[in-house]
Image (spheres, helix red, strand yellow):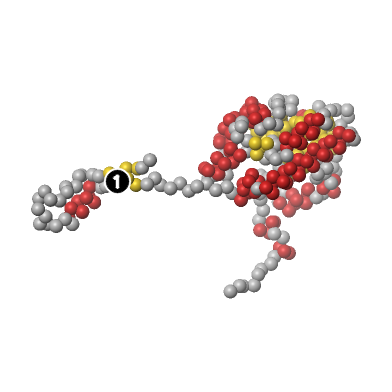
Amino acid sequence: MKHLISLPAFALLAACQLLPAAAPAGTEPVPAATETVAVPEPTVPEATPTPAEQWLFGSAEANVVLHQDWNDIASYVEAKVAARPNASVVLASGATAEAPAFLACGDKPMAAVFDADETLLWNLGSTAAFTRMGIGFDPKVWDQWEKTGAGKAVATPGVLDAFRRMRAAGVEIIVNTNRSAENAAGTEATLKAAGLGDFHHGTTLFLRGDAPDGSGKDGRRAMISANYCVIALAGDQLGDIADIFNAKDLAPPARKALTDAPVFGQMWGNGWFILPNPLYGPSIKGTMDEVFPPETYWQPEATE
Ligand SMILES: [Mg+2]
């Protein structure tokens, strides 16, 4: 569509003053009081995926990493079913790096507990919408997405085959996500539409609002553990494993060191699994000195 604009009358008057004074009457066009001129629509810059979006959602490399990860998770779960553990991989209440402790399993059935967003699901519809809007995130838009995004989020690479293997091994798959409990129906529909299966709020789907600790997930992990021996936890954020990693005062180097603490450090790939997410979350943080240790400072010589 073209926009029509009116030329101001004064511009036409100025043009009239340039007409030859002696022009015979009737030989020159008489300008109307106003004229309309077609001008092009302002150009809207085309949206471009961010480098993180290109890597995670668009690259063959990320596709391979996710297939590797989900293969590892399925193999780990199958091995645990073959050699039933006594202890869950859920940290006991009050456990620390100095005094780690895990919940006991008893004879409860085994379950694997997974985060949803950027773990089981790639939120392609909402991420592209945010990118087209030129914003990183908007909670009101996200709330709409939780309600209506079914069919526009896809299963992460490798997860469908891993689910098939884990279910064949007899393990219950439970989702623990910070999507809102108020939008449970939308999240159940989104998981189903992505091919991940039927999940039910309160039994196999736990949402923000189900426990009093807000976006913390320890409360929900305790609820799940009342009925299950959790043999695997996986997510794209450390909070999907234990809330202790999301302590507010932890700068990136201290947070990294906590993941290397003696007992915690042996859990990665061994009951605790983290999948790549360079898009958002507490991993996207850090000053130059926190990201690049000062002892690695290097400066090239001036080049001509
Ligand atoms: Mg997530």
- Measured as percent of width and height from the top left, residue 69 is found at 76, 43
- Measured as percent of width and height from the top left, residue 6 is found at 28, 44
- Measuring 81% from the left and 30% from the top, which residue is drawn there? 168
Q: Which residue is mark 1?
A: 37
- Measuring 66% from the left and 50% from the top, which residue is drawn there? 285
Q: Name the element at disc 1.
A: strand
Considering depth in this image, is 221 or 84 the residue closer to the camera?
84
- Measured as percent of width and height from the top left, residue 283 is found at 68, 48
- Measuring 16% from the left and 47% from the top, which residue is drawn there? 30
- Measured as percent of width and height from the top left, residue 123 is found at 63, 38
Taking the image as shown, residue 151 lies to the left or right of residue 294, namely left
Taking the image as shown, residue 267 lies to the left or right of residue 148, namely right
Amino acid type at image mark 1: Val
Q: Quadrant of residue 97?
A: top right
- Measuring 41% from the left and 47% from the top, which residue is drawn there? 42
Q: Is mark 1 within 8 Å of ligand 1?
A: no
Q: Can you say which quadrant of the picture contains the C terminus?
A: bottom right
- Count of numbered badges drawn on the protein: 1
In the image, residue 296 above or below residue 70: below
Q: Quadrant of residue 20?
A: bottom left
